[in-house]
Every structure is written in C-alpha cells, then in structure tokens.
Amino acid sequence: MRRNANDIIYDEVAVLGTPALFTDWRVDRATIPADMFLYEVRHADSDWGDPCQLAWGILVNFYGTILTAQPMDIPESGYLNFDSGDWVYAEGDTCAAIPEFLKKYGVKEGEVNAQHDL
C-alpha cells in the first residue's frame, strides 16, 4: 500500500549531501508536490538498517522513500549506489512535513524545477 505524501511525518536526512525527507513507507507519486522528486531506497543484503542505493523504484530490500527539492543524478542503470557515510540524519532544526521542507530547501523564485515523469 502506498501512502499519501501529505499525511506522513518525515525524518530529515542528507543523501550524498542533498537534503531530503525520509519515510519507511512507500509513497504514492501522485500525491507529491510537482516541485519535488521521489526516490525509493534499498537496504544492503547483509544489514536491513544500512541504506545503500537510490532508484526510481525498489522491489527487493525496500528501505524507504525520500523526497528531495533537487533531482538526484541517477545513472542510466536506474540505480545510484552510496556508502553508509553518505546517509546522514539531520540534527537540530529539522523538517517533519513537506511544507516546512519546501520553505527551507525548495525552489527559489525564478528557478525551474520539473518533476521527472515515469
């Protein structure tokens, strides 16, 4: 079951230095704002608590979903591998909902950000 993105309380993380909202739920793409990007995260085979890969969609070893205000550079293979040090939970003044996140990290006036259609 996929959840409505607007009904979820998120953790703020940085993945490869990019700010993101994280949830362990699968999120319905139709419910995310047009100026955000959705990626699914895979966990390592050897450790269910070790996120290690981003993709447009994950079938096996699903770890969760991230939303970003900037696109991630996903290679033609469709998967972006990363190390455990590339996934950092935010400390301090963090965002828990989409509107807060977009206010903090969203598209600035005059910039263009188009959602990748799948």
Image: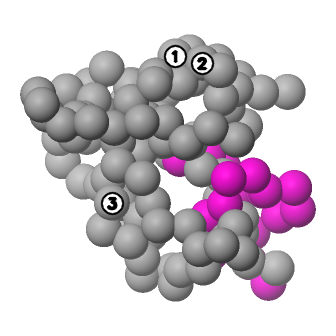
- The span picked out in magenta is 46-66
Q: Nearer the viewer, residue 94 or 27?
A: 27
Measuring 65% from the left and 29% from the top, which residue is drawn there? 29
Task: Tell me which label, 3 or 1, sits earlier in the chain.
Answer: 1
Residue 23 place in picture, x, y as percent: 57, 41
| Residue at mark 1 | 6
Q: Nearer the viewer, residue 108 or 6?
A: 108
| Residue at mark 3 | 18
Q: Is residue 70 magenta?
A: no
Residue 59 place in picture, x, y as percent: 87, 55
Q: Amino acid at mark 1?
A: Asn
42 is higher (above) or lower (below) than 50: above
| Residue at mark 2 | 31
Task: Tell me which label, 3 or 2, sits earlier in the chain.
Answer: 3
Q: Please give the count of numbered marks on the rendered protein.
A: 3
Q: Nearer the viewer, residue 59 or 13?
A: 59
3D distance between C-alphas at marks 3 and 2 = 21 Å
Q: Nearer the viewer, residue 75 or 11?
A: 75
Query: In terms of secondary structure, where does tag 2 sit?
Result: helix
Residue 108 place in picture, x, y as percent: 14, 34
77 is higher (above) or lower (below) than 95: below
3D distance between C-alphas at marks 3 and 1 = 21 Å
How are the colours assigned in the image?
one colour
